[in-house]
């Protein structure tokens, strides 16, 4: 694999990774403008803007955007996260130029037709309604909110209905003007790609963008609190979070290994103890997430109102026990799972393009895959035990949804963790 990086005079970065033997490629634009870059009155606008990109440009109608990519058998999509908005396409080798032309058009020239804004507003409100009707989705939005209360980092990406209902064409244009500068964009492509040809085309499409000062965002500060929503559901949806390292912290891989040992698969501690041995739930897992200046270890389980007390106690006890008896075999298995998941994922050009875009945004360079593997392999059992011990005295947040009247409080959980 060959990774190449070129920066245009206006600051836009172009990074590619040639993957020999492939006949297809993935290419897109990653913009450092996500949920955390919104002011309170803008909450949800980054996601709204992502939707509007496909609703027509000055050159193409919404139908033409879809047809031009699908006529050549390609696929186009976008997503909004807390730190980025991405617009990308997967096409055959001969159609990379077309994909870049379409993506450049939807990013730089959205029409923001007032009629289409109203149509898409209704679509997004339906999406919000669907999320509210999906307990194991909405509980994570609430968990984010109580982990980072009154902060951009804690707000939902979709935004509240009242905000989404009020966004105007002027609001969308203002967010683009504020956040869609060339220094905030990365054009990434992987697969059957020609770096030099992409640079030439990128200069033609994006070279005219004027550099602008990047807007600062509010640093994230974990301030764990609690939210419980009582509703007549079949299950209690239990989600808990702990403060964890960001991307650049030395412990970021230790946190990943720890989360994998606790709830990353069927052999993990929580799955074995709580589901397999006690039958207290169907679904239970733990995961680690990292961002530029923050991170979270999150736990989730769904159980009955009668079993939530026992499930919580067992979960806390397993978290505590990990600091004393985490085994070499468990850590080795977790390292293997993380490496395999990463390497298997990188067999697709879409995953490769996303990886190089994200790493360039985080580090200003693209570390080799072997570097990540080496850092995972360097995590020792002693590291995981130390991290497990630190976690039991760190800040925590709790979100509960369903028949939760008798569920343990966050205060009670903290007391048991530290007792």
Image (cartoon, rainbow, N blue to C red):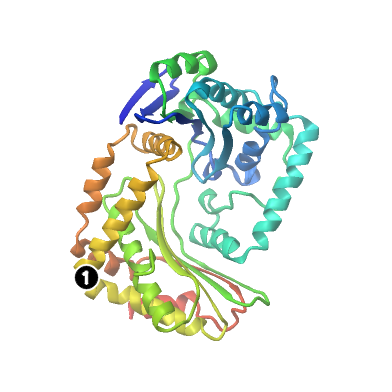
Q: Of residues 368 and 175, which is closer to you in this image? A: 368
Quadrant (top left/top right/bottom left/bottom right) for the C terminus: bottom left
Q: Of residues 23 and 194, which is closer to you in this image? A: 23
> In the picture provided, is 79 more to the left or to the right than 2?
right
Looking at the rendered structure, the secondary structure element under dot 1 is loop
Q: Residue at x 58, y 49 (%)?
A: 157
Residue 165 visible to an observer of this rendering:
no
In the image, residue 392 sits, relative to residue 164, either above or below, namely below
Q: Of residues 171 and 158, which is closer to you in this image? A: 158
Q: Residue at x 56, y 58 (%)?
A: 141
For disc 1, the marked residue is 327
Q: Residue at x 35, y 68 (%)?
A: 262
Rendering quarter of residue 205: top right
Quadrant (top left/top right/bottom left/bottom right) for the N terminus: top left
> In the picture provided, is 36 more to the left or to the right than 318?
right
> In the picture provided, is 265 more to the left or to the right than 60?
left
Residue 259's x, y, as percent? Answer: 35, 62
Q: Residue at x 55, y 45 (%)?
A: 35
In the image, residue 90 sits, relative to residue 281, either above or below, namely above
Mark 1 surroundings: few (<14), some (14-19) or many (≥20) residues within 10 A? some
Residue 123's x, y, as percent? Answer: 73, 46
Residue 11's x, y, as percent? Answer: 43, 21
Residue 356's x, y, as percent? Answer: 38, 35
């Amino acid at each position: 694999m060959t990774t190449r990086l070129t920066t245009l005079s206006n600051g836009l970065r172009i990074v590619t990774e040639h993957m020999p033997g492939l006949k297809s490629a993935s290419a897109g634009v990653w913009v450092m403008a996500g949920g955390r870059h919104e002011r309170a009155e803008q909450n949800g606008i980054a996601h709204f803007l992502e939707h509007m990109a496909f609703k027509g440009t000055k050159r193409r109608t919404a139908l033409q955007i879809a047809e031009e990519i699908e006529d050549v058998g390609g696929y186009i999509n976008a997503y909004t996260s807390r730190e980025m908005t991405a617009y990308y396409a997967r096409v055959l080798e001969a159609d990379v130029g077309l994909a870049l032309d379409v993506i450049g058009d939807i990013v730089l020239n959205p029409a923001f037709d007032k009629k289409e804004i109203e149509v898409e507003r209704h679509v997004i409100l339906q999406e919000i309604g669907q999320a509210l009707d999906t307990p194991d989705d909405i509980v994570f939005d609430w968990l984010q909110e109580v982990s980072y209360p009154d902060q951009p980092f804690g707000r939902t990406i979709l935004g509240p209905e009242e905000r989404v209902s009020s966004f105007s064409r002027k609001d969308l244009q203002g967010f683009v003007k504020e956040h869609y500068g060339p220094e905030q964009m990365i054009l990434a492509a992987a697969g059957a790609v020609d770096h030099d040809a992409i640079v030439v085309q990128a200069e033609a499409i994006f070279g005219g963008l004027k550099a602008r000062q990047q807007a600062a965002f509010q640093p994230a500060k974990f301030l764990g609190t609690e939210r419980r929503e009582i509703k007549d559901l079949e299950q209690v949806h239990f989600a808990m979070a702990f403060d964890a390292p960001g991307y650049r912290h030395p412990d970021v891989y230790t946190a990943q290994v720890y989360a994998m040992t606790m709830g990353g698969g069927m052999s993990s501690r929580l799955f074995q103890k709580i589901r397999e041995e006690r039958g207290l739930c169907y679904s239970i897992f733990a995961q680690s997430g990292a961002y530029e200046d923050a991170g979270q270890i999150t736990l989730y389980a769904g159980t009955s109102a009668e079993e939530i007390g026992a499930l919580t106690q067992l979960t806390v006890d397993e978290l505590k026990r990990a600091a004393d008896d985490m085994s070499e075999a468990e850590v080795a298995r977790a390292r293997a799972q993380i490496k395999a998941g990463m390497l298997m994922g990188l067999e697709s050009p879409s995953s490769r393009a996303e990886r190089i875009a994200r790493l360039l945004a985080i580090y200003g360079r693209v570390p080799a895959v072997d570097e990540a593997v080496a850092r995972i392999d360097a995590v020792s059992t002693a590291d995981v035990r130390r991290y497990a011990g630190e976690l039991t005295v760190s800040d925590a947040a709790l979100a509960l949804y369903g028949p939760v009247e008798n569920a343990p409080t966050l205060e009670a959980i903290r007391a048991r963790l530290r007792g």
